[in-house]
Image (cartoon, rainbow, N blue to C red):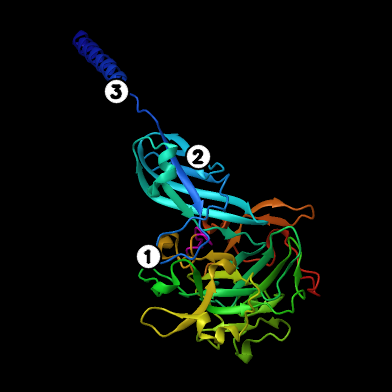
Amino acid sequence: MKRYFKLIFSLTLIAFISSCISMMDNAQDVPEVSKIEVSYKIAATTAFQEKNGEVIPDPNFSVEGLKVEFLELQTNAITVGTTDANGLVTVNIIPGDYSIKVSGSVEFEGFTYMMNGTIPQTSLVKTVPVEEAMSRRDLLIVIRPSKLAPLIISEIYYCGASNYYFRDQTYHITNNGNKTEYLDGVCFAQLHPATISGSSTLPIWPDEIGVDNYVFGHVVWQFPGNGKDYPLEPGESVVVVQEARDHRENNPDSFDNSMANWECWSGNQGRNNPDVANMPAIFTRNLNKMQWLTSVFGSAFCLYKPDDGTVVDAAYYEKDENLQTEVNKTTRYAKIPASWVYDGVELLADMSLMSKKRIPGFVDAGGTSVEQTYCQKVVSRKVVGKRADGTPIFADTNNSTEDFEVILYPQIRRHGTKAPAWDGTNK
C-alpha cells in the first residue's frame, strides 16, 4: 500500500512539474508590451474665461520646468516628465488609461505663480509625436496661473469641541515669505456656499461672468490700517477668532484663545471681549448677530487684496457691480476676482466631496478636512523647512490636500511661529 501511494505521489509531482514548465513556455510566448512615446503641450491662460467658450492660451507666459505625472489607472504606476521651454512634455509609457497631473511653479514678470492642472482620465494607446501635441487641441492642457503670495492661512480650527461647543473657532494668518508684508487692507472672506454636504448642489452663476473668474463672499472681514500699520515679518502670524476668551471656563474640553489679535464680533454685546480688537466686517449676508459661526463641517476661505489700486471697503460692496446673485435668485454675494486672491483653503465635510469644491482649482487644487465634528482637530500646514531664526516655512503648493495635515487639539502659533512686534503682549 505504501509503495502504491508513493507511485501516485510521484506521478502527481511529475504532472505538476510538467504543467509548470508548460506554463512558463507559454508565458515566454506572450509578446512583451512595448512602450509608446507620448507628448502633451502645457500652456497658461490669463484671459477672462468664458463659461462655454474656448480657453485662450497666453503665448508669452512661460511654463517651462513644470512636473507632469502620468498615472496608469490599473497599476498605479507613475511616469514623470518635465515641460520644456515650449511647454512640451514627452514620456515613454505602456499603453493604458491614465490620469495626468501638472504641478509646479514658474517665474513670470517678477512674480512666482503656482500651476495646477489635471486630466482625470484619458486613454493613451498609441504614439503621440511632438508635432501632434503642438497642433491638436485634445493634447493641450491649459492652466490658469495663481500668483503665489506670502500671506497664507496656516491653520484653521473649525470643528469645535465635545458637547457641541463651537465658539472657539480660530484662524492663523502667517507671513510665509522672505520679506516684510503688511496686513493693512487685506480681506479675509468666508465663501459661498457657507456649507456643503453630499446632497448639496453648487450655485449656478450667470453665463456673462464666465467660469472660475470669481469667488463669492458670504462674509468679508478686513484687516484695519492705513497701509503700513500692521507689518508682519517672515515667520510671524496673527490670530483671528470667532470669540476671544479662555473657553475652558465654558467647556473644559476647549482651549484658551483670549490672546487673539482680532475677534470677528458680529454685534452681540455679551460676546464682545473689550481687550481684543474687533475685525471690521465690510460685507455680510445676514450675519448672525449672536456670533460669526462658520460651519463645523467646513467652509471655504480666502485672503485677498486688489493689486490694481482698487479700494475695497464697505462702500465698495454697496455698489451693484461688485455684488452677484445666482441664476433666478435674489440673495447677493461679494463678487471677488479670483486674480486678487492671495490664498484659498477648501474645507470639506469629508474628502469624498471634492466634486463640491467652491474654490477654483487654480487657487486650491485640492481640499482638506478633519472629517468629524466636535473632535478638537485642526487642519494645519505641513512644515517644509526652517528659517535661521527657527520659524517654520510652510507648504504652499496651492493644493490643500497636499499642503495640510490633521492635528489633534488647537494651539496658538504652532511650530514656533512668532507674534508681530506691535502685539504688545508678544502673545
Mark 1: few, some, or many residues within 10 Å (few <14, many ≥20)? few
The N terminus, quarter of image? top left
Query: Is 419 located above or below residue 25 in the figure?
Result: below
The residue type indicated by label 3 comes to Val
- The residue wearing badge 1 is 52
Query: Is 312 located above or below residue 391 in the figure?
Result: below
The residue range painted magenta reads 362-371
- The residue wearing badge 3 is 30
Residue 347 in the image, given as x and y percentages of width and height: 50, 66
Please report the residue visible at 72 percent of the width from the left and 52 percent of the height from the top: 386
Q: Is residue 370 magenta?
A: yes
Residue 264 in sight: yes
Whichever of callouts 1 and 3 sits on the residue coming sooner in the sequence is 3
User: Is 223 left, or right, of 68 in this rendering?
Assistant: right
Q: CA distance from mark 2 to mark 1?
A: 32 Å
The residue type indicated by label 1 comes to Asn
